[in-house]
Amino acid sequence: MFFVIKAQVIINGLPTYYPFTGLNAYLSSTPLQGKAPLNVQFTDESKINPTVWIWDFHNDGINDAFIQNPSFTFEVEGNYSLKLIVY
């Protein structure tokens, strides 16, 4: 089964969507698919030099990480949508 990871990024309160085109916030993640449990390394590649990162890996309103480049283990196979807020 594949994991599908989509991202929404909020830059200073303005939502944008991944992949980003012509914006100054970027992120990457690896791997994007595999078997559960899947440990994914997320990398903030923002060009705006943020000092605050708020990651919500299940896009459920619960903040999961507050560092620039976190990793997260998805325990159950499925499709996931995540949110990154940067300031």
Image: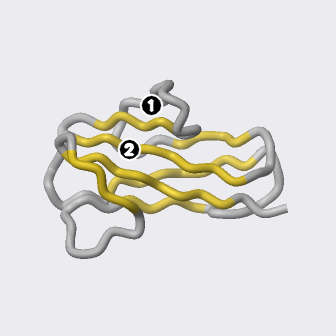
Percent across and percent down for residue 6 are 53, 58
Placement of 54 over or under 8, stated as above or below:
above
Amino acid type shown at disc 1: Ala
Percent across and percent down for residue 79 are 69, 54
Residue 78 left/right relative to 72: right
Residue 5 left/right relative to 77: left
Residue drawn at 18 percent across, 61 percent down: 47
Who is closer to the viewer here, 42 or 84? 84
Amino acid type shown at disc 2: Leu
**Do residues under tags 2 and 1 come within 8 Å of each other at their CB atoms?**
no
Percent across and percent down for residue 7 are 47, 55
Specify the quadrant of the image occupied by residue 26.
bottom left
Colouring: secondary structure
Who is closer to the viewer here, 73 or 1? 1
Residue 52 left/right relative to 69: left
Alpha-carbon distance for marks 2 and 1?
10 Å
Q: Quadrant of the C terminus?
A: top left
Residue drawn at 71 percent across, 63 percent down: 33
Q: Label 2 belongs to which residue?
A: 84
Residue drawn at 51 percent across, 46 percent down: 82
Tag nearer the camera, 2 or 1: 2
Q: Residues within 10 Å of mark 2 (few under 14, many from 20)?
A: many
Placement of 28 over or under 84, stated as above or below:
below
Classify mark 1: helix, strand or loop: loop
Q: Residues within 10 Å of mark 1 (few under 14, many from 20)?
A: some
Q: Which label was assigned to residue 65?
A: 1
